[in-house]
Amino acid sequence: MSPPNSKPKNTSGSTSSSTSRSAQGWIWLAVLIIAIAMPWAFYNTHTGRQSGFVVSMLSQMGMMTILALSYNMLLGQAGLFSLCHATFFGVGGYATIHFLNLAGDGSLPLPLGLFPLLAGLSGFGLAIVFGIMATRQRATAFAMITLGIGELMTTAALMFHHFFGGEGGVNSNRMIGHSLFGFKYGASIQVYYLILAWTVISALAMLFLTRTPLGRMANASRDNYERVQFMGYDPRMVRFLQFALSGFFAGIGGGLYAITYEIVTFDALAAPLSANALLMAYIGGTSAFGGPILGAVLITLLQSGVSLMSNSWLIYVGVLFIAMVIFAPNGVMGLIAAHDPIVRAGRFSQLLLPYGRVSVPGLIMVLGFIGVVELASFLTIGAAQGKTLVLFGHQIDDHALAPWLFAGLCLGGGGFWFSREARSFRRVWQGLMAELQTKRGLA
Amino acid sequence: MQVGLISLLDGLVYGMLLFMLASGLTLILSMMGVLNFAHASIYMLGAYFAYQIDQWVGFWPALVIAPVLCGAIGAAIEVWGLRRVHHNGHIAELLFTFGLVFIIGRGVQMTWGMLPMPYRVPASLDFPLFTLYGENFPAYRGFMLLVSAGMLLATWLLLKKTRIGLIIQASLTHPGMVSALGHDVPLVFTTVFAGGSFLAGLAGVIAGNYLTTESAMADAMGPIVFVVVVFGGLGSLMGCFIASILMGMIQTFAVVINASLLDVLKPLGVTLSGDNLFTEFMTVPVARIGALLPFVLMILILLFRPRGLMGTRDT
């Protein structure tokens, strides 16, 4: 998080040259192949099945990728900070459950593989209705209206039992006997490949949308909406279309959610999921198209890994998020992209030593922070759950002074050391950047 | 009638509480254009601080110390947080306060645990003030009304009668001009942010034992306060006041109304049969959908009057 944050805003990847774009294409192809092969890397020969944990985590990643990408249609591409994105995800899920029930009765003869499309249309319909209200405004007012819409739908989901099923939610059975390619979708691995297929389709569709005039005008209305008006476009209409389409894709994600879990409760449209969409898109990086994909994978990994170990994983995500907002507004993807010119000039080796020098105090600081957070949370939440803090086989007494002192010292001392190293790192970085710039100017 | 009077007083108490939160938020929002998502979190911090200080030294010191602490935290957030992200634009500021919600929420859980705190009404205020139609009106609610009314008066005097208030009012509408006249606008911003946080903290202190002091109290209050701010309109404390009282009344009166939409339409000869979403929508009693009403009202006002009740400008 040390590179300077005064980079000019990237207009959604259009500044990268054609060579690096084809390189990016190869990277994403590799990601796709890994996604296809991953479940088989965790194949258990004894049970003759893939690891259930891995498959469900990968499925979650797929759905979250769609959610984060569709969220980025608003935040990254149109500059709209929405807080009700999970509404369309959830409604897509609820609708799919009802469609599945209809199909189970035999009154909806449609293969399961196409159900996400129905879910997407449900999300699209609702996004049109809410979009008319919300997209009259932009920036802060838009955020407030979407917050209201999200709360409205969450409260409604708990009150109206016929469609939302109240607190218990609605459930169904995905094995409806119709499918496109003869799968029964009994095993979760088959559902995973359905999710993967829809994720790829949705991602490609959203990538295509960024290249259309609508996508370009969304970028323009984000950067300078008054000028868009001068050119004869209606920024409100652009916002509306972008909002409705992002609702469509979020609905697809919700449909896949319903097919995977066969139950949808109000969690699927409540505020925490909307916040999650925001976190994934932002931490991954909103200015590059692939950023939200990276964010969805990272956050899902954190969620399934760290949340098992720690009560307070959300505080880590929160701190990471705030650090990103302050130091790296273009997300992880932006940080990687910032190295691009240095790597291309073959000067990356000069950064290795500074990186090493920064990472030591950085690591100490992070460890100290984790120590303080965990000690505090074991003192209260852990004690209430009857857990004790065990580290490397040693039980650690969270009432004693020594661990607190040690963690605090790591945090304070590491932080101080880190801030000094970060300053020298920034000098090296800026020097390198200036050097490259003058070289480019001469050439 | 008896239900009406008690509900009226309860609605007033709740409305004044909302106003204490919303007034700070609306000032921050109109001046700096920052929707401070963490405002309700600071309200929660106020309640937790008050509980802790109440344990150590008692309620009356807590009434002063906890809001001051909250004000200091607000100032720190403005100086070290918001100013740093300011050059990245409004969205970055929104995101920053949004991240704070996570950190404060989890931090509170880490420090005090997940269970509700036994933060009680002080014994000196724990008696019925008067009895109306056989129902007691607790003295503490009267005290809440007193504190919030006093705060309202003090804020009004500060804004209307003092030089600082004059500058704050001017910065609301013409920050560039105020700056050009040689006033330190960033300092004004910090002051307003600290003042808003102080009010939110005070609301937390007096509401923490009236409602419940728990880690979900910020999430419960936050959306309603935003509704109040949108409904009242930007740049208008009067609109904010009316909206707060209105929302307070709606929330308390909705609980006691057992009628549904169908009951209203019955004299017109409308009858419904069957069991589907539409009949459920028509027959659900108002008491059950009370929590929905503020959001419905907000959407309605945005449709017909986008700048809010008494807003002076669009956002």
Image (cartoon, coloured by chain):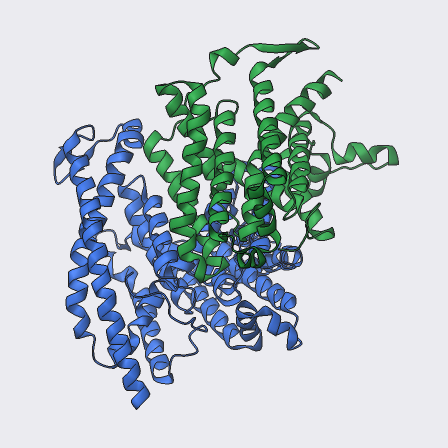
Chain colours: A blue, B green
Q: Residue at x 52, y 22 (%)?
A: B210
Residue A235 location (% of width, % of height): 63, 68
**For residue B278, which quarter of the picture?**
top right
Task: Judge left or right: residue A136 versus residue B51.
Answer: right
How many numbered marks appear? Answer: 0
Q: Nearer the viewer, residue A308 or A403?
A: A403
Q: Nearer the viewer, residue B94 or A50?
A: B94
Q: Which residue sits at x=26%, y=30%?
A: A379
**Residue situated in front as seen by the camera: A296 or A317:** A317
Q: State the image coordinates of residue A169 (x, y, percent, origin top left).
A: 52, 41
Identified at 60% across, 74% down, the residue is: A227
Q: Relative to B200, is B169 on the left or the right?
A: right
| Residue sitting farthest toward the right | B268
Name the residue furthest bottom. A443
Residue A362 shows in the view: yes
Horizontal side, residue B94 vs residue A408: left or right: right
| Residue B51 rendering spot, x and y as whole percentages | 41, 24
Residue A46: percent from left, percent from top: 21, 52
